[in-house]
Amino acid sequence: MAVPAVKRVPAPPPTRSKTRWIPYAIAAVLTFCISLTFFSRQSMRASQTKAPAATVVQPPPSVPAVAQQVAAPAPQAPAPAAVEAAPATEPAPVKPSEEEVLLGQVKALWASGKYAQAMEKVDDLLTTHPDYMEGRIWKKKIRSAQEAEAAMK
């Protein structure tokens, strides 16, 4: 008995999977979000305009009062848009605390490589405020920078 030859059918060509578009969709969404963020920040910066400050001209005291009235220009009413944009009262400038001032000096000295002077400032800060954590952190940074500098020599 002869066994009939089985014809082998070639496999169908591989089809592209439907999930192949997912990376492209993700890339498109990310690109959209990044561009949206970029443009919204640009428009926020552009919308933060300040009203021009009014300049006051003081004539010298030797000029008579009549001449002062002529020399000083008449104040003009600001535009309605400028009135809405101007804040009602300007906040008083915040005076930095003693710790912030000393840390600013420490950071400047550390950045310029004057580690001994920076360490003195940190020690001054820690004597007045022994529990100040940022002062301790800067002390460790300065010590490690001094050790690294000593190792290089």
Image: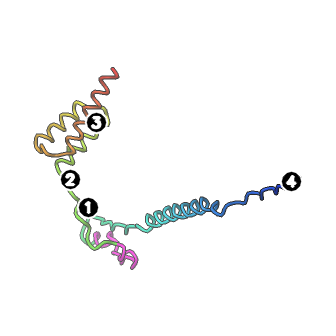
- Badge 1, how many Cα within 10 Å: few under 14, some, many 20+? few
Which mark is nearer the camera, 1 or 4?
Answer: 4
Tell me the element at label 4: loop
Q: Mark 3 — residue?
A: 110
Which residue is label 2 attached to?
96
Q: Is residue 16 left or right of residue 151?
A: right
Real-space Cα separation, disc 1 to disc 4, in angstroms:
124 Å
Residue identified by numbered label 1: 60
Q: Which residues are magenta?
A: 67-85
Give me the residue at 82% from left, 57% from top. Answer: 9
Kind of element beneath mark 2: loop
Q: Position of residue 130 (x, y in %)?
A: 12, 43
SS assignment at label 1:
loop
Mark 2 or 1, closer to the camera:
2
Q: Residues within 10 Å of mark 2 (few under 14, many from 20)?
A: few
Q: Which amino acid is tagged 3?
A: Trp
Precedes in sequence: disc 4 or disc 2 = 4
Which numbered marker is on residue 77? none
Q: Residues within 10 Å of mark 3 (few under 14, many from 20)?
A: some
Question: Which of the 4 quarters of the picture holds residue 22?
Answer: bottom right
